Image: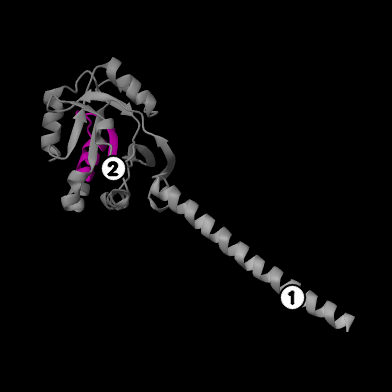
Amino acid sequence: MKTEMRTIKAGMNWRLASRLSVITFAILVIIVVTVIQQHNSAGIPNGSSLQGTDLAGAPAPNFRLTDQSGNQISLQQFKGKPVVLTFLYTHCPDVCPLTAEHLHSTMLELGKDAHNVGVLAISTDPKRDDVAAALNFSQQHQMTDYWHYLIGTQQQLSPVWSNYSIYAQAQQQNINHSMAIFVIDKQGHERVFLSSNDFTPAQLTADLQILLKEQA
């Protein structure tokens, strides 16, 4: 009889322990799911589904420069919108015009969502890129209504280049500079990096469509 009682108690203890294990596991799952939901709702960057080099959500450095219409433009004013940030110069014979054309194609692919995206092109040629040159370049590539082509003096532009690790050096009539596109989310986090030398409009459009769906 005592043996049977011990057997029954052992069975009960095992079932109790098993149930407690299941309950504990369920609680852990709920905790993990809750943390992930809070993580996402807080807007903490997760660039795993974006195309390009993951930038781990670093805060994008702010700046204030003059655009092709003579207006003062800052990065901070675009909070609540995804932003495409690139670096160009208007006298560029090759890559920069192609980048501008690809950006225009991206805006066309976005359709009505294009105006929910900020596009900023920062000059790497302070000596020649003035308001007139920036406006002419914008008109040539049908980007006047889509982007802000930002210009400034060497003293104004150099800190921005430095903050984004952009190399810009004049060589005769050309400017050797980094081929960079930064894709920034609604909260001002750097999400991915694309090379302006080989990105495609489809690639950039897909990234922006993802970011447009995220909470501000």
The residue positioned 65% from the left and 70% from the top of the image is: 19
Examine the image and state in which quarter residue 182 appears: top left
Which quarter of the rendered picture does the N terminus lie within?
Answer: bottom right
Q: Which amino acid does label 2 sit on?
A: Pro
Examine the image and state in which quarter residue 13 appears: bottom right
Q: How crowded is mark 1: few (under 14 residues within 10 Å), some or many (20 or more)?
A: few
On whether residue 34 falls in the magenta region, the answer is no
Residue 77 point in image, percent of width and height: 24, 32
| Residue 93 visible, this angle | yes
In the rendered structure, which segment of residues is drawn in magenta?
83-104
Question: In the structure shown, which secondary structural element does the residue marked by tag 1 occupy?
Answer: helix
Q: How many marks?
A: 2
Residue 6 point in image, percent of width and height: 84, 77
Residue lying furthest top: 155
Q: Mark 2 points at which residue?
A: 82
The residue positioned 29% from the left and 21% from the top of the image is: 157
* Residue 51 appears left or right of 116: right
Q: In this view, does 175 lie above or below 29?
A: above
Q: Earlier in the sequence, mark 1 or mark 2?
A: 1
Q: Name the residue under label 1.
A: 12
Q: Which of 185 and 207 is in front in this view?
A: 185
